[in-house]
Image (tube, rainbow, N blue to C red):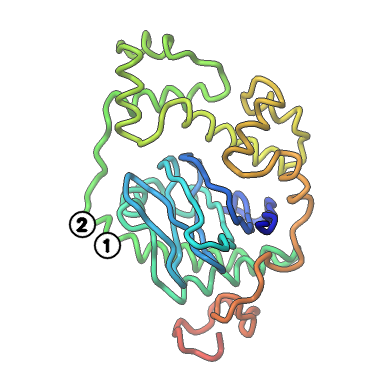
Amino acid sequence: MAAPQQIQAWRPSVPGVVEVLHAHFTEHTYPMHVHDAWTLLIVDDGAVRYELDRHERGTPDDTVSLLPPLVPHNGAPATAGGFRKRVLYLDMTQLDASFIGPAVDGPDLTDPVLRRRIGQLHTALAHPGDELEAESRLALIGDRLREHLRPRLAAGGPVPGHGLARDLRDLLDGHLLERTTLDQAARLLHAHPAHLVRAFSAAFGIAPHQYVMSRRVDLARRLLLGGQPPGEVAAAAGFYDQPHLTRHFKRVLGVTPGRYTRAGARPPGRPAASKPSNSSYSSDCSDSPDCSDSPDSRAC
């Protein structure tokens, strides 16, 4: 019998961090979905394979994965024992939209210093009262990510638009909580409904309805972690009723809204993952956010 999945999620009081998620999944497969925030992911056990912008990606040992907002991706265990991960969801104050294209081109970063700093940030976020330390570590992480992405930004130039597909996405974003029909969208955009679906799916790799539901699930997560009960969240996030929320929430996250709320009742005392042999969990320099950048430094 497969080990039960574990999940912990909370919303810290640190500007720039929308949510923290620690999880151990053995069988759950994420469908194609999007987030409205940057997804900064490290895997402590096992490995994840995922598709981003129609390219197969993965998380080999000691990498950091940065998945950009509003770009569809999925995820599945790449090893028999599943995977144990820690995720930070960062808002656009940390990385602006200009970095989305470079992140799509190369989401997996091999950088021991960056990975170590992310592990230290998770530790700080798990301890209320350590917000100043967390803010300091987040500032260094953001700077390090921009160092990786800026050269690609200069080489790649602006990301081209997708015409009709982008117009439909803007329309869906602007009416996320409303029950916009495909016929209504077709009339507003002067296009046949079937053409809209084909254009959107071809451009973004996800159907319009999948896009809307995953955006609503993202909103529901924030509201649940903010303390609202699932019944109220369903209506506030644009779902028909609570069973409708539960069905789509479990499809994306692998757990029900109620279980997710219980997991986020309070931050854990320590990171969810067990301490691995690498330096990601090193606490020797946890009181010094500007410790040596050398991967071989014993001070870190």
Q: Amino acid at mark 2?
A: Ala
Left or right of residue 198: residue 89: right
Crowding at dot 2, Cα within 10 Å, few <14 / some 14-19 / many 20+, comes out as few
| Residue 148 in the figure: left or right of residue 262 | left
How far from the left and from the top, in percent, is residue 18?
A: 60, 49
Name the residue located 43 percent from the left edge and 45 percent from the top edge: 73
Residue occupying image coordinates x 30% and y 25%: 199
Query: Is residue 215 left or right of 9 when viewed as pictured?
Result: left
Q: Is residue 81 above or below residue 53?
A: below
The residue singled out by tag 1 in the image is 151
- Residue 142 versus residue 293 in the image, above or below: above
Q: How many marks?
A: 2
CB atoms at circles 1 and 2 under 8 Å apart?
yes
Disc 1 secondary structure class = helix
Residue bearing mark 2: 155
**Residue 146 placed where, x, y %?**
38, 62
Q: Amino acid at mark 1?
A: Pro
Residue at horizontal 78 percent and vertical 34 percent from the top: 229
On the rendered structure, is 229 left or right of 1?
Answer: right
SS of the residue at dot 2? helix
Residue furthest front in the image: 1
Based on the displayed image, in which of its 4 quarters is residue 138 positioned? bottom right
Quarter containing the C terminus: bottom right
- The x, y position of residue 64, in whole percent, is 45, 65
| Mark 1–mark 2 distance (CA, rounded to whole Å) | 6 Å
Residue drawn at 49 percent across, 84 percent down: 292
Tell me the crowding category of disc 1: few under 14, some 14 to 19, or many 20 or more residues within 10 angstroms, Cα based.
Answer: few
In the image, residue 194 sits, relative to residue 47, either above or below, namely: above
